[in-house]
Amino acid sequence: MNEKLSRTIKLFLLWGLFYIAAQLVCFVLWRAFKNDEIMKWSLLFGLALIIFVYFKKHYVKLSFGHIDRRLVWPAVGMAVLIASAFVLAEMSAITLFDLDHLFPEKTEFQHETLEHLFVGIAGILNGCVLAPIAEEIGFRGILLEGLLKSRCRPWLAIFISALVFALAHGFVVIKFVCTLLFGMIIGWLYWRTESIIPCILMHIGNNSLSAIDISNQPRAICWVIFVGSILLLALGLWWYRKKCKFVNEFN
């Protein structure tokens, strides 16, 4: 095992321990006080601390990478566009192909997750802002970056980081597949731009829009949403491929 890969594994495991510890503290506090707000605010503090430490110590670099400074705002818009298109494509596909009936645990998982993530100021900040930033630090800023610098083939590195990312989000079948695809898209974005910023924006957009429910829409509308979102997703990825000056510094 080369030195770069060894350091990557150590940093990622350390990040994972911090992330799990933050959640364990929340659980202990909830068990002690039976108060959701205390749990949410303690998690907020834990996530904020992880983010501060990893950026302060420069374990993860916060830069625009290969994104032209004149295209920063279009890049921000395209990251949000990709996130929005992915969420809409996921939701419309689940509705069109009756995936909730094939894997009914998906509905229960979504309900329980959204109930805790998107209630109150602390819940929204945790689920929509801090958790995405903290996860991008770990899965893209540390794991994927380290794999790429360890001479791992780009698509293999992207797949490995996406697989670990999906496994960390649970074993509900549909959720796992969607998270794996999301991880590969966002991993490609990181490889292409060598910047964690669009990845963070895309992850924030994805989590913020995940409460969308189109299951009651007519099938014709769902088909329009599905096809349109796939086209928008392709447009966003094409834009990054076309506009970012790609320099393969990893290999």
Image: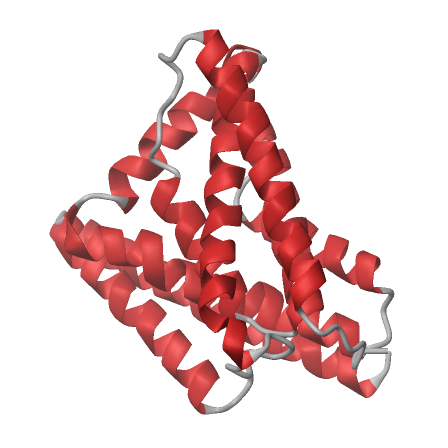
Image: 34 above or below 98: below
Q: Quadrant of the C terminus?
A: bottom right
Image: 228 above or below 82: above
Instruction: Evaluate whether residue 171 shows in this view.
Output: no
Q: Quadrant of the N terminus?
A: bottom right
Q: Residue at x 40, y 76 (%)?
A: 51
Instruction: Evaluate whether residue 165 shows in this view.
Output: yes
Image: 107 above or below 187: above
Determine whether, in the image, residue 239 is placed left or right of residue 115.
Answer: right
Residue 237 horizontal/vertical position (percent): 65, 52
| Residue sitting farthest toward the front | 70
Who is closer to the viewer here, 217 or 147?
217
Q: Residue at x 55, y 85 (%)?
A: 59
Q: Residue at x 52, y 89 (%)?
A: 58
| Residue sitting farthest toward the bottom | 57
Determine whether, in the image, residue 31 is placed left or right of residue 144.
Answer: left
Who is closer to the viewer here, 124 or 199?
199
Determine whether, in the image, residue 150 is placed left or right of residue 228.
Answer: right
Determine whether, in the image, residue 188 is placed left or right of residue 223.
Answer: right
Q: In the picture, residue 89 is in which quadrant?
A: top right
Q: In the picture, residue 111 is in which quadrant?
A: top left
Who is closer to the viewer here, 174 or 68?
68
Image: 151 above or below 189: below
Q: Residue at x 26, y 70 (%)?
A: 45
